[in-house]
Image (tube, rainbow, N blue to C red):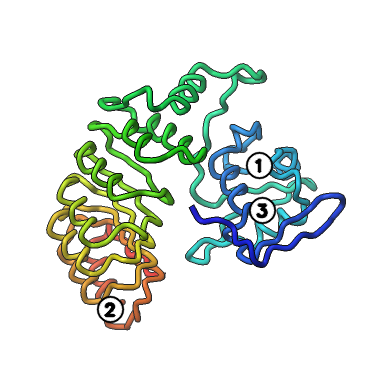
């Protein structure tokens, strides 16, 4: 997982609090904390979330994660934080003098671990904590609930306990969804996935570009023939060969994210779109494509002939 850069870090004293300013605000500790709370952990941190996903800023500032930051710093981060595609991450509203904020996309709040109005852990939370802490004592092979497996996997990633040993305990022959984005993997990790998870439908390998190449991806596709949704965003070693292999080995793929990969050519993408007739979503933003008028027109023509298809170019 990427670490906040040491260079360019400054400190600013403000009202007794120390604000940390990073050269890259999109990769700062504050940015990661905000993303965690406003996308996943608000309920778990004891915050009240409205039906539309808004959280009161004054309540957020009571969470220990934000104890070193001022209100002005948080609001500034909300206003300037953008996604890889330049879209704003957060929405801020003022209601009767109170500031509310929410994540614009990606909300998937974790359950409150306690019984309401108590500090008594729910039985499910105790079980998940126990399994995640002692995962090497368990095998989840044959366990059918992808949601709970995903929860345990998320806990291992968050606590930096996810490695080949613990991953082997997580993988299951019944597993259909696996999110390994921003995780340190090895060739052995991929071999385990190929061997253990033949029924995978959704696989997220975002930011695993240090490992994934055309040959490894082809081996994955051969062993995971039911894949419908594949995310290899920023896997920069992949080339157009992977698109050709995908059309051959995964002709029924429906969702593909190949954003931020600079090795593709427009003609190869067009051929892939023509060959994969069940495709519904293709992300190719920040691929350094020239986006010629002829290419854009042809993409639009294909999308018009297939109303369910969406191609994200920018």
Q: Which residue is mark 1?
A: 55
- In 3D space, how far apart are the residues under numbered discs 1 and 3 (Cα atoms)? 10 Å
**Name of the residue lying farthest toward the left:** 248
User: In which quadrant of the rendered image does the C terminus lie?
Assistant: bottom left
Residue 109 picture location, percent across and down: 53, 37
- In 3D space, how far apart are the residues under numbered discs 2 and 3 (Cα atoms)? 38 Å
Total tally of numbered discs in the picture: 3
Residue at 69% x, 47% y: name it: 100
- Which corner quadrant of the image does residue 301 belong to? bottom left
Residue at 58% x, 60% y: name it: 26
Label 2 crowd bin: few (<14), some (14–19), many (20+), radius 10 Å:
some
Residue 226 picture location, percent across and down: 19, 44
Looking at the picture, tell me which residue is in the foreground, 261 or 52. 261
Residue at 45% x, 28% y: name it: 132
Give left or right: position of 242 versus 208: left
- The mark nearer the N terminus, 1 or 3, is 1
Q: Which residue is mark 3?
A: 92
- Which corner quadrant of the image does residue 215 belong to? bottom left
SS for tag 1? strand
- Indicate whether 196 appears above or below 260: above
- Kindly check if marks 1 and 3 are in contact, taking CB atoms under 8 A apart as contact: no
Q: Which residue is mark 2?
A: 295
- In 3D space, how far apart are the residues under numbered discs 2 and 1 (Cα atoms)? 43 Å
Residue at 19% x, 45% y: name it: 224
């Amino acid at each position: 997982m990427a670490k906040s850069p040491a260079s360019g870090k400054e400190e600013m004293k403000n009202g007794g609090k120390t604000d940390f300013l990073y050269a890259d605000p999109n990769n700062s500790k504050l940015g990661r904390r905000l993303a965690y709370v406003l996308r996943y952990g608000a309920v778990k941190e004891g915050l009240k979330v409205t039906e539309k996903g808004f959280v009161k800023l004054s309540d957020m500032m009571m969470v220990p994660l934000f104890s070193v930051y001022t209100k002005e710093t948080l609001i500034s981060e909300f206003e300037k934080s953008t996604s890889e595609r330049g879209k704003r991450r957060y929405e801020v509203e003022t209601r009767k003098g109170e500031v509310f904020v929410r994540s614009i996309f990606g909300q998937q709040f974790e359950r409150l671990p306690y019984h309401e109005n108590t500090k008594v852990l729910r039985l499910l939370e105790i079980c998940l904590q126990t399994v995640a802490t002692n995962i090497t004592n368990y095998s989840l092979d044959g366990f059918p609930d992808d949601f709970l497996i995903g929860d345990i996997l998320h806990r291992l990633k968050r606590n930096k306990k996810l490695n080949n040993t613990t991953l082997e305990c997580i993988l299951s022959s019944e597993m259909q969804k696996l999110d390994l984005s921003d995780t340190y993997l090895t060739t052995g990790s991929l071999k385990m996935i190929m061997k253990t998870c033949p029924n995978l439908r959704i696989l997220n390998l975002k930011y695993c570009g240090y490992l994934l190449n055309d040959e490894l991806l082809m081996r994955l596709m051969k062993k995971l023939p039911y894949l419908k949704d594949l995310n290899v965003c920023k896997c920069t070693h992949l080339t157009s060969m992977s698109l050709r292999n995908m059309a051959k080995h995964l002709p029924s793929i429906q969702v593909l994210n190949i954003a931020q990969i600079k090795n593709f050519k427009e003609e190869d993408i067009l051929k892939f779109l023509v060959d994969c007739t069940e495709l519904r979503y293709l992300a190719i933003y920040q691929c350094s494509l020239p986006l010629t008028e002829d290419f854009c027109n042809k993409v639009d023509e294909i999308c018009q002939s297939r109303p369910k298809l969406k191609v994200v170019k920018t």
